[in-house]
Amino acid sequence: MLMKRLRWLRIILLALLLVSLPLLVGCGGNTADSRDTEPTARSGDDDGDDAEEPTLTPEEEYEELTEKGDDAYDEGAYQTALGYYQQALDIAKEINDAEKEPEALYNIGFTYVEQGLTEPALENLQKALSMYVDNGDIEGEGNTMIGIVMVYTQLGQYSQALDVSDQALAKFQEIEDGEGEAMVNTQIGNVFLDQEDFPKAISFFNEAIRISQEIEDASLEAHNLGLVGLAQLLMGEPEVALVTMQEALTLLQETDNDNSIASAFSALGYTYNALERYGEAIEMFDQSQEIVRRIGNKELEAENHLNTAVAQYSLEQYEDALDNLDKAIAGYEEIQQYNNVATAWENKGIVYKDLRQYEDAVASYEEALAIYERLEDEAGIQDVNASLATMPIFEYNVNLVKNPGNELPIENGEIPFWIEAAGTNWGQNAEVPVHEGVAYFDAGEAGYLAELYQDVNVIGFADAIDKGEQQFAFAAYVRSYPLQFAVPVDAAQIVVEYFEDGAVDPLDSAATDEIFVTDRWFEIADTLTPPPGTRWIRLRLISVKYGGYDSDGYFDDLSLVALP
């Protein structure tokens, strides 16, 4: 099964399918050798170094900061990039440069787009657009509109995205900018891709390909070929997608765009994962890594570690998968992509769970949860809590039965953590004195037999169970309703069954006799030794009706405790 139970990145399959469109117009380029992780001090500031540095003009300082921002952006270090771009914006405002200010605003806005932070992205892009309009910079208008289209797409506001796309297309047609026209068609395709209208998305990607061929832009053509492959993959056609993505890689290898080539290898690796050809997937990720380590794309390097771990997990190479997840965590921490750090921790929890290293699994999930809570990521919090809820309990002297006395509120007519196997009116009752708490289990109106059950997870004790050494203390309280006038009394019965993981038929079972006690709660107590292979213990509560309308075998305060 594809990626089994792993939930890796919360992205639309390939966030780095090939390379982000070259929308950072007018910036200083990516020629700087330095890869600073923090913004540098402004010229003239005292940094404590006695060596005298050359004084830069504000314009030169702006270009240097923009260049460093571009480098950080290309590495995926978006917070660092924002710091540089913000300093560049401050300089542009100080010198009242009407051309540099919208460029800096655009760079800030687009960096927020990459982070999925739609509100500040839209705010900065709209400011940039207004200034480009005032300047009469039609190319700047068009490029900024493409960024706004991307924000509206992220927000799911598709009609607004398409409206702005039409405006951007008109701008590029006005100045006969074929590259801009192709990029607009790409973004329109992305709008339909996000809506899962794959044929329409492909039609716009193909139009972008046609224009790219006319203007002889191989990188842009390959990018859109890759997006066609992505759409084919999402349509459930991985074999077709593989061919398309191989064509994209071939095109890119004729260029000097190493970043795009590395991303294309990663896209192929993901596609091989989808085809369950995991060995070939690892080969593709390795080839991508050779390039990204040379060019310094830290984001794609971390992504490759994560996706390599997917393949290794699927091949049951768990230790290798854990090693790559650790490297992904370190990489994402370096570039401050903490949402992906949390995802990698979450996936470590999944691997550890499969290895039955439950304490490590819980610790990994808790690391992920702490980050999601700090980021206020509700979806992430919900996912991790759901995973933690399924973790096997391996504590001794703790009741493993959930909702053991039917005290939790009824949810949508159902008793939490219990399943109705026969009878549909199981609920809470307190007509006769409860044994403890405020309620007990009551089948209500039912036929001859009514049954409720719960499967108790004992996977955490697997080693001791398989050695025949693990015992559990079981206890429950049962009784019946005291009827008069010679009406037969209903009975309560409990059955315990032992199951292998995923099995339908039990390994073994044990049952009490039918119990007819009406004047008190009758205690059932026993020490259970599950047979080897047991991973779940099913507790079945059976009410047997011998007269009247309701089935009046009652149950309260069940417990199943692992003995040390």
Image (cartoon, grey):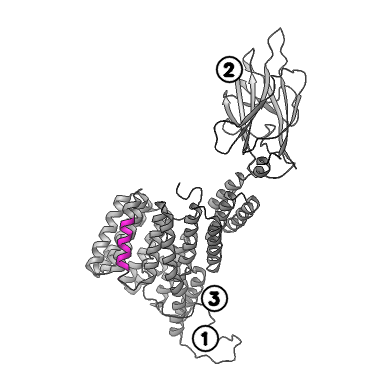
Q: Residues within 10 Å of mark 3 (few under 14, many from 20)?
A: few
- On the rendered structure, is 279 left or right of 564? left
Mark yes or no: residue 457 visible: yes
Report which residue position mark 1 lands on.
Answer: 43
The amino acid at mark 3 is: Glu
Residue at 29 percent across and 51 percent down: it is 200
Report which residue position mark 3 lands on.
Answer: 38
Front label number (3 vs 2): 2
Image height check: is 458 above or below 478? below
Which of the two residues, 61 or 487, is positioned nearer the viewer here? 487
Q: Earlier in the sequence, mark 1 or mark 2?
A: 1
Instruction: Please state, as top left, top right, bottom left or bottom right, where the C terminus lies in the image.
Output: top right
Mark 1 and mark 2 in contact? Answer it, CB < 8 Å. Answer: no
The amino acid at mark 1 is: Ser
Tell me the quarter of the picture where residue 131 sits. bottom left
Disc 1 and disc 3: Cα gap in Å?
Answer: 15 Å
Mark yes or no: residue 16 visible: no
The amino acid at mark 2 is: Gly
Give residue 438's mark. Answer: none
